[in-house]
Image (cartoon, rainbow, N blue to C red):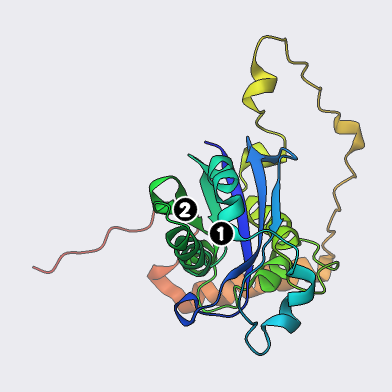
Amino acid sequence: MRQIVLDTETTGLEWKKGNRVVEIGCVELLERRPSGNNFHRYLKPDCEFEQGAQEVTGLTLEFLADKPRFEEVVDEFLAYVDGAELIIHNASFDMGFLENELSLAGKGRLAGRVTVTDTLAMARERYPGQRNSLDALCRRLGVDNSHRQLHGALLDAQILADVFIALTSGQEEIGFGQPEAERRGADVAVQAFDASVLLPRPRVLVTTSEQEAHVSRLERLRKKAGHAWWDGERAPEPQENS
């Protein structure tokens, strides 16, 4: 299935209060690899930013004044995501806003066109009781987000794509598997394993005094344990009460 990592930026936290989407960023994954076929649009919201929302995104109404409204790009957006699996962090937030935008544009529900995977729910299941924000997951999974100064839909989608692959990685992500396109037709060269590149294993040497101390400790344990001691042979069968 075609996967699309999606993020939105909005004028506030709740669409029910009249807030709108101001940015959509999508990263397409084919065979779990970025294809380069991304979707990114800034949108004119026709409403004010809530206090604090503008500082988070760095966007302004002046910057968005000449950008298209959602209804002007809705058909292009739907054609892009149609039939895909959407990968979203805190999916209920973005899906709520997008469903509202589609409703205002007179379109059907997005949920009927796509499937949705919520990486926040995945992270909470894997790391219960821990912080599972996108930044926290980047630190935990070793994903570089040092270039993320402000929230941006396309940038966050690109970072989330790395987080999602790290969250769901298996053998195919570390060289044990191949994309379907690479498996078709051609012979596959197998690289031989060169054991000479391995570093020598460390050896632990036991001194005579350490060996004597070990034997002495085992003898004391045997005396304390009595019949319960198991020395590598079959333990005595327990006696049943008569």
For the C terminus, the quadrant is: bottom left
Q: Which badge, 1 or 2, is on the more N-terminal residue?
A: 1
Q: Which residue is tagged 1?
A: 88
**Image quadrant assignment for residue 99:** bottom left
* Residues packed near mark 1 inside 10 Å, few (<14), some (14 to 19) or many (20 plus): many
Residue drawn at 69 percent across, 39 percent down: 33
Query: How far apart, in angstroms, are the residues tagged by discs 1 and 2?
Result: 7 Å
Q: Closest to the observer: 67 or 231? A: 67
Q: Give the amino acid type for the residue marked by disc 1 in the picture.
A: Ile
* Residues packed near mark 2 inside 10 Å, few (<14), some (14 to 19) or many (20 plus): some
Q: Which mark is residue 57?
A: none
Residue 196: x %, y % from top left: 91, 32
Say what secondary structure mark 2 lies in. strand
Q: Which residue is tagged 2?
A: 116
Pointers 1 and 2 in contact (CB under 8 A)?
Answer: yes
- Is 9 on the left or on the right of 91, as rendered? right
